[in-house]
Amino acid sequence: MNLSKVRMVLIATSHAGNIGAAARAMKNMGLERLYLVAPRDFPSEEALVRASGATDVLQQAVVCDSLAEALQGVGVVYGSSARQRTLAWPEVDVRGCAVQVSEVSLQDEVAIVFGRERIGLTNEELQLCHTLLHIPTNPDYSSLNVASAVQVVAYELRMAFLSSESAPVVEPVVADALARAEEMAHFYTHLEQTLVELEFLDPKNPRQLMPRLQRFFHRSQPTQLELGMLRGILSAALKKKKA
Ligand code: SAH
C-alpha cells in the first residue's frame, strides 16, 4: 500500500464543515491528498475549525471544476455510493476496496470519489468510476454523512496499509500499465463517435448502450497497449466507412 498515491475526491460539497471533517479524518489515517470538485463554500472558516489540526490537508487541497479534471493522472477510480443503482455496476465493499487499493497503489494513482450530501453522484460522474464502493449499512437507513463515509474508507485503507507493512515484500509484477482514466475517457468518445458513424448507435435513441459498454470495458481493465489496439480498430472501421 502506498497511501500517498490515493486521492480522496469530494464532489460539490455543500457544507464547509464536512470538508474540514473529511480533512481531519484523512490526516488521522495518514492520507493527505484531498481534491474538491466545485465546493460550494471553500476556503472557509468553518472548514478550518472542523479540520482541527489538519489545516495542512485543507491548504494543499486541489480545487477543480469537474470530476474529469480531478481524475487527471489517475489509473483506477472508485465511486463511493450509498444507493443501489438501476444499472448494475461492478461493486466492492469498503474492505475489499482497501485490499485492491493496497495492490494498485504500488504502481498507479487511485481516486476515491464521494458524492454530494443530498443527491450523491450523478450518472455521468458514476460512469467515470470503474467500480462502486459500498459501506455496508442498515439497508433501511444506508446513507452516511459524507465526512463519516470518508472516515470509514480512510480507516479501512489504514488497516490494509498496516497489514501490507507486516506482510513480506513481494515485488509487483511488471506488466503493461493499465489504461489511465483520461485515456479511457478518450476511448469512450472515440467509440461513441464510431458507433454513431456506423449507425449502430442512434443519438436520438441511445438507450443504455454507452453506459453498458463502459461498464464492460471498466470491468476488463484494459492496458494502454490493449486500448491502443481497440482505438486502431475504431479508426480502421471509420476509414473504411468514409472510403
Ligand atoms: N442521498 C445520497 C446520499 C449522499 S451521502 C445518495 O443517495 O447517494 C454523501 C456521500 O457519502 C455519498 O455520495 C457517498 O459518496 C458517501 N456515502 C454515504 N453513505 C455511504 C455508504 N453506505 N457507502 C458508501 N458511500 C456512502
Image (tube, grey):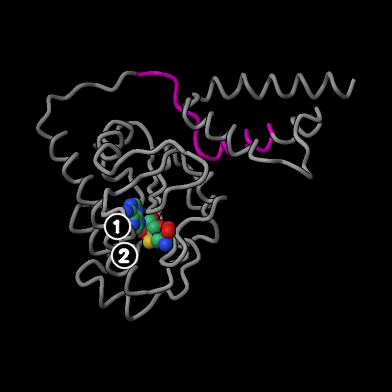
| Alpha carbons under labels 2 and 1: distance apart | 6 Å
Q: Which residues are magenta?
A: 174-191
Outermost residue, right side:
243
43 and 118: which is toward the camera: 118
Indicate left or right for 53 with 200 as reference: left
Coordinates of residue 142 in the picture (x, y in percent): 32, 57
Visible in this render: residue 181? yes
Outermost residue, left side:
166
What mark, if any, has residue 4 been given in the picture? Answer: none
- Residue behind label 2 places its C-beta within 8 angstroms of ligand 1: yes
Pick the quarter of the image with the C terminus.
top right
Indicate left or right for 150 with 242 as reference: left
Residue drawn at x 88%, y 24% is: 242
Q: Which residue lies under the disc numbered 1? A: 149
Coordinates of residue 58 in the picture (x, y in percent): 33, 66
Q: Which residue lies under the disc numbered 2? A: 145
The 10 Å Cα crowd at callout 2, few under 14, some 14 to 19, many 20 or more, is few
Q: Quadrant of ligand 1?
A: bottom left
223 and 143: which is toward the camera: 143
Q: Do tag 2 and tag 1 residues touch (Cβ < 8 Å)?
A: yes
Pick the quarter of the image with the N terminus.
top left
Q: How many marks?
A: 2
